[in-house]
Amino acid sequence: MTTMGQTVTAMGLEKKLDKHELKKHAATIHCSNTLSLLQRKVSNALLYHAYKELMVKEEHQISIKKLCQLISYNGHNHAVIREALKGLLATVLEWNIVNDTTGSEDWTASSIIASVSLQGPICYYAYSPRMKQLLYSPSMFGKINLYIQSRFKSSYGLALYENCIRYRGLPNTKWFDIQTFRKMMGVPQNNYIVFRDFKRRVLDKSVEEVNTYSDLLVEPELVRERRRVIKIRFLLKERVKKIRIGNKVTTEEEGSSEITIVRELLINEFGVSPHQTEKILSQYSLKFIREKMTVIEESKNYQLGQVKNSAAYLLSALKNNFKKSKNSGEVIKQKKQEKDRKLYNLKELKRVAEQIDKAYLLYREQTIDKKLNELTPVKKKNFMQRFHQFAALSIKTILKLQRKKYNETTILNSPQIKALLRQFAMQTLPDLQELLQPIEKFLDQFSKEQKNAWYQFKLVEPYQQDMD
């Protein structure tokens, strides 16, 4: 990816984001909301970034640069990101889930994120306990590919894609009554009341986007009653995937004979496992695989029968792009040494950066707590009354889920409620923002080497997963 503001090449973007798939709970897909396109993208990116630590961390953090990378936003106007985050705070999701024990439906509502704070280049955000519980172990979900998401141009197009991807592998979606479908698409209640307008402004354009930008092909089916449309569903097909054989681009079906030959060579001649074979075929072009087979077969060690594990040798040749060389062993050794050196440097940068981030987080918490303790009794009472209104849903949820651990008196000891309290203080105490140092200023207390390490790691952090 190029720097912010420059053109992002499609090939580079696809390589970085195509691996990024988010398991999104069906309840948060088939729900009523009016999110904009940017808000939908940001919401999915934040959840993808936090997912692995969703249940173990009260607050998550992501650099603005990383967030922009995940949503493929390459502009300089970060104010629009801030407005999108504010929109997620204000947007309430509603969903119904069938209770496995009673068979009844449980209704739940929650804002998409419970709190958010921008401190310099870092975004801090948190989810409510109820949202965490719903999102972490989804029994029903759709896989949202962040690369495909980045291509959509409208909120309606992305909403239709999310609502169809849940049914991937099936010939069609379920039937939706038209009013429910309008809510799922995020159409305001008083907009496009006449179906002809809804079809032209929303349905046709969203279908066109899904069929243009995604890996699905969808076709709407309508049920009419007395000439009035009352239900809709979508027929689903997988888009035919293209593969590259040498300089020729063809379909999987046309290239199947060549794929079969290479598959048999990998398994029978080089002893690669069937599972690893499919992985190799998905990662490399057939021309590249053939080229590495030839390099190995023409190597002196192979011809002398000194290669004990042909499969491992081939995997290494593919990964390290072996070339014909009289001194290939030295080349491989140098590459490994260079990779080890880069990996060591990255780990050291990460260690220093995490140490500084931890110190800054502690500084923020202590500063906020001190400010709260300095409030007069009257101001503090007023502040706490407003906070209890702000966090009523989260407090109620924790008291319900952790009734043995907390009660009305001790609920403020809950780590989740402490985090919400500090976020509320940041939003409602204007002089607190001025009191808190931005992280760039906080860095002045560290050595020049530590500061440089922090800045260097923040530059490479968005690409760390690919480097690992």
Image (tube, helix red, strand yellow):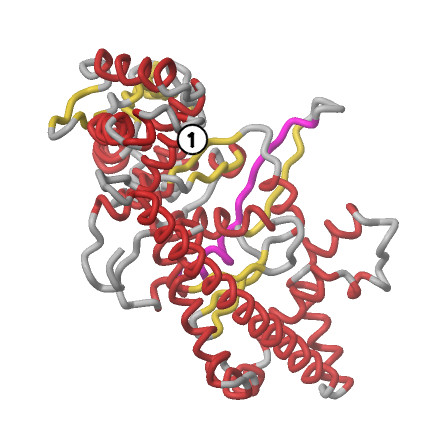
Which residue is depicted at the point 51% across and 32% down? 26
Which residue is depicted at the point 40% across and 51% down? 336
Closer to the camera in the image, 380 or 422: 422
Give the x, y percent position of residue 314. Answer: 35, 30
Closer to the camera in the image, 340 or 387: 340
Is residue 265 among what the camera can see?
yes
Q: How many marks?
A: 1
Is 89 part of what is drawn in magenta? yes
Give the x, y percent position of residue 7. Answer: 18, 57
From the viewer's perspective, is residue 203 above or below residue 17? Answer: above
Give the x, y percent position of residue 192. Answer: 29, 38
Is 11 part of what is drawn in magenta? no
Closer to the camera in the image, 467 or 97: 467
Which residue is depicted at the point 28% across and 18% down? 262
Direction from residue 161 to residue 359 in the image, left or right: right
Direction from residue 214 to residue 315 in the image, left or right: right
- The amino acid type found where label 1 is placed reads Ala
Give the x, y percent position of residue 87. Answer: 44, 58
Rendered image quadrant of residue 337 = bottom left
Direction from residue 381 to residue 324 in the image, left or right: left
Q: Counting other residues with Cα less than 10 Å from the Cα at mark 1, is it few (<14), some (14-19), or many (20 or more)?
A: some
Which residue is depicted at the point 65% across and 82% down? 367
Direction from residue 440 to residue 303 in the image, left or right: left
Residue identified by numbered label 1: 312
- The span picked out in magenta is 84-99
From the viewer's perspective, is residue 267 above or below residue 432? Answer: above
Looking at this view, name the residue that lies furthest to the left: 247
Location of the N terminus (image quadrant): bottom left
